[in-house]
Amino acid sequence: MIKRCDHPGCTKAGTCRAPKDHTLKEYWMFCTEHAAEYNKNWNFYANMTDDEIEDDWESSVFGTPLKNRDTTSHINHDDYVKFINDFLTGRDKFDRIPPKPKTPTTITSALRTLGLGVNATWRDVGIKYRALAKQHHPDTATNKENAAAEFARISAAYDTLRKHFGKK
């Protein structure tokens, strides 16, 4: 059922709900024009003391105001203060990213031999190896002098990477 706008003297349909107070249990029903006007001027924390505002904020964040919690609770005031102090003064503890495990030198060397970066996948290794093997194989290479040595170097790198990626 559509109700008339609750603004005095308005006869339009009250299709917009607006809270009467910060408990959000009772609402006015306004037309869009009066709802916009009401919302511009409405203050959720009107008629509340600073302590009530802080309690409300803590309730919304922690479930209950910290000063109302008992000492056996999972968080108490001292823990909260310590957390905030640590967060503000020791920011590096919160921002620290664990170091990436260093790739062994033999693996990076093998990847470099194939012309690949450290983020290369097994598929990338296979594609690059086949292209280089075809180019440097002693039977198909254009530069036959260094072909055998280069092919052996590429094959050794491929074998190292095959073991690293756990392939047979």
Image (tube, rainbow, N blue to C red):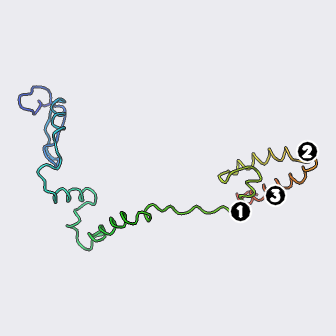
Q: Earlier in the sequence, mark 3 or mark 1?
A: 1
Task: Give the quarter of the figure containing the C terminus.
Answer: bottom right
Instruction: From this view, report whether residue 1 is shown above or below residue 22.
Output: above
> Within the image, what quadrant is residue 38 found in?
top left
Q: Badges 2 and 3: C-beta atoms under 8 Å apart?
A: no
Q: Badges 3 and 1: C-beta atoms under 8 Å apart?
A: no
* Mark 2 surroundings: few (<14), some (14-19) or many (≥20) residues within 10 A: few
Residue 84, percent from left and from top: 32, 64
Q: In the displayed image of the protein, which residue is found farthest to the front?
A: 89
Task: Give the quarter of the figure containing the N terminus.
Answer: top left
Compared across the picture, whether 123 is left or right of 82 comes to right
| Residue type at the position of mark 3 | Ala
Task: Please give the residue where the numbered disc 3 appears in the rendered image.
Answer: 156
Compared across the picture, whether 100 is left or right of 10 comes to right
* Mark 1 surroundings: few (<14), some (14-19) or many (≥20) residues within 10 A: few
Find residue 137 and name its label.
none
Task: Please give the residue where the numbered disc 1 appears in the rendered image.
Answer: 105
Find residue 143 and name its label.
2
Q: In the displayed image of the protein, which residue is found farthest to the top?
A: 11
Q: Earlier in the sequence, mark 2 or mark 1?
A: 1
Q: Earlier in the sequence, mark 2 or mark 3?
A: 2
At 86% from the left edge and 55% from the top edge, which residue is drawn?
Answer: 152
Instruction: From this view, report whether residue 58 is shown above or below residue 3.
Output: below
Q: CA distance from mark 2 to mark 3?
A: 20 Å
Residue 81, percent from left and from top: 29, 68
| Residue type at the position of mark 2 | Asn
